[in-house]
Amino acid sequence: MNTQSFYTRKMLLQYGKQLVAARRLARYEKAIGKVREQDQEVIHARRKAMVERIAGEIVENLIFSGSDNPVVREVKDALAAVLEERYIFKYPPGDTDFQIYKVTPGGEVEVSDDERHEVMSKLWEITLRTVNSTML
């Protein structure tokens, strides 16, 4: 009987160690889960900053330079679909600011300040959405 109680005690001792190890692992997994959530927030913030930077680049450099890039074409087509008008963006020579013209049957007409603000805000939204959908 003495030998059996030794094995029983050894088995119970091993089982107790396993329980302690299981509790420790559960605490570590819980802590790692919180860290992973924080990592996801950091990754999301970095991605958002990158999308905004690229969208700004597209708006400032490509659209106003008249680029025929596929992304620029997609943004301009989406803008025309949303606002139901075609717009032309130009930097006139000698001017420091860009101008937005609406394409009408009678020719190009410069937009008012209110309409310019609306066009630029829609342009920014569409560009952000387009860049966000195309980025990995």
Image: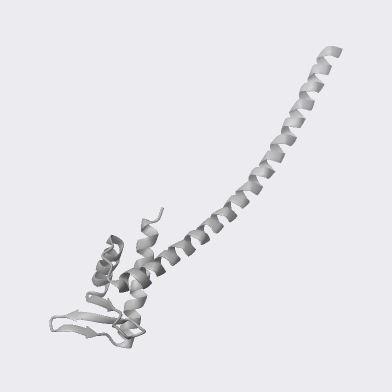
Residue at 46%, 62% in the rendered image: 50
Q: In front here: 42 or 26?
A: 42
Please indicate whether residue 23 sits to the left or right of residue 133 in the image.
Answer: right
Residue at 54%, 54% in the rendered image: 40
Q: In front here: 60 or 19?
A: 60
Residue 80's spot in the image, x, y percent?
24, 72
Looking at the rendering, which quadrant does residue 26 occupy? Answer: top right
Picture mark count:
0
Q: Examine the rendered structure and indicate whether residue 28 appears above or below residue 117.
A: above
Residue 120's spot in the image, x, y percent?
35, 77
Residue at 33%, 80% in the rendered image: 118
Tell which residue pokes out farthest to the left in this image.
Answer: 105
Tell which residue pokes out farthest to the bottom in this image.
Answer: 112
Residue at 27%, 85% in the rendered image: 111
Q: Which quarter of the image is occupied by the N terminus?
A: top right
Q: Examine the rendered structure and indicate whether residue 127 appears above or below residue 30.
A: below
> Looking at the image, can residue 128 be seen?
yes
Residue 99's spot in the image, x, y percent?
30, 82
Tell which residue pokes out farthest to the front in this image.
Answer: 94
Looking at the rendering, which quadrant does residue 85 occupy? Answer: bottom left
Looking at the rendering, which quadrant does residue 19 occupy? Answer: top right
